[in-house]
Image (cartoon, grey):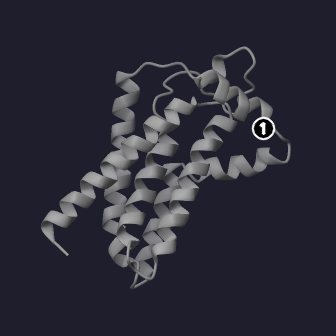
């Protein structure tokens, strides 16, 4: 199933028009691209309280991604004969680091904005995280199951930190 979904997204959906779009989307999953916008929240009174939780989620998802890559030695689909990867990665596929941090931060933002005037930010962040995951498949460097695993790792850390926040200051 992984191969069939990978082939559909990476090969069948390929388009020269989509290549630059997915390059931009995938780039937003890089840590050095994700962290600065979070720091910009310090300038906004209504978003300032999000900075700590988002950076903590970012750090924990990033570290757990590194740990998983050491524990789960998995070749990337870029090694398949029909793959035309747009990046030069060939090993340590599980999970997708871009997707782990994107989902962790998106779900954290979803929790933080729930029931507030900023609730749309959390929903849009989740759409963004899904697009980052799809971009990693489209670009030929991750399996669909890498995305699912990454989404669950991000969900785990965001939910655990939300539980801890709720324990410390019940609503």
Q: Is residue 77 above or below residue 16?
A: above
Give the side of residue 39 with respect to residue 81, left or right. left
Q: Which residue is rendered at x = 58% and y = 54% of the image? A: 28
Position in image of residue 122 (x %, y %): 47, 66
Outermost residue toward the left in this view: 168
Q: Which residue is rendered at x = 71% and y = 26% of the image? A: 7
Total marks placed: 1
Position in image of residue 5 (x %, y %): 65, 29
Q: Is residue 128 above or below residue 42?
A: above
Outermost residue toward the front in this view: 1
Location of the N terminus (image quadrant):
top right
Q: Which residue is rendered at x = 49% and y = 64% of the image? A: 36
Outermost residue toward the top in this view: 81
Q: Considering depth in this image, is 140 or 52 the residue closer to the camera?
A: 140
Location of the C terminus (image quadrant):
bottom left
Give the side of residue 104 with respect to residue 124, left or right. left
Position in image of residue 116 (x %, y %): 40, 80
Position in image of residue 125 (x %, y %): 52, 62
Q: Which residue is mark 1?
A: 13
Q: Is residue 105 above or below residue 157?
A: below
Q: Secondary structure at mark 1?
A: loop
Q: Considering depth in this image, is 115 or 46 the residue closer to the camera?
A: 115
On the image, which quarter does residue 12 sit in?
top right
On the image, which quarter does residue 63 sit in?
top left
The crowding category of the residue bearing disc 1, from other C-alpha atoms within 10 Å (few below 14, some 14 to 19, many at least 20), is: few
Q: Which residue is rendered at x = 53% and y = 18% of the image? A: 75
Give the side of residue 20 with respect to residue 147, left or right. right
Outermost residue toward the bottom in this view: 45
């Amino acid at each position: 199933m992984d191969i069939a979904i990978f082939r559909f997204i990476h090969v069948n959906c390929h388009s020269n028009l989509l290549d630059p779009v997915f390059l931009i989307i995938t780039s937003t999953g890089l840590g050095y691209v994700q962290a600065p916008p979070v720091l910009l929240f310090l300038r906004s009174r209504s978003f300032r309280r999000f900075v700590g939780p988002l950076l903590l989620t970012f750090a924990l998802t990033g570290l757990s991604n590194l740990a998983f890559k050491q524990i789960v030695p998995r070749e990337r689909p870029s090694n398949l004969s029909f793959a035309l990867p747009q990046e030069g990665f060939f090993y340590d596929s599980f999970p997708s680091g871009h997707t782990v941090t994107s989902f962790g931060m998106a779900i954290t933002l979803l929790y933080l904005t729930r029931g507030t005037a900023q609730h749309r930010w959390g929903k849009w962040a989740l759409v963004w995280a899904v697009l980052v995951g799809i971009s990693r498949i489209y670009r030929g460097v991750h399996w669909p199951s890498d995305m699912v695993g990454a989404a669950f790792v991000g969900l785990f850390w965001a939910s655990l930190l939300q539980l801890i926040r709720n324990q410390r200051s019940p609503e």
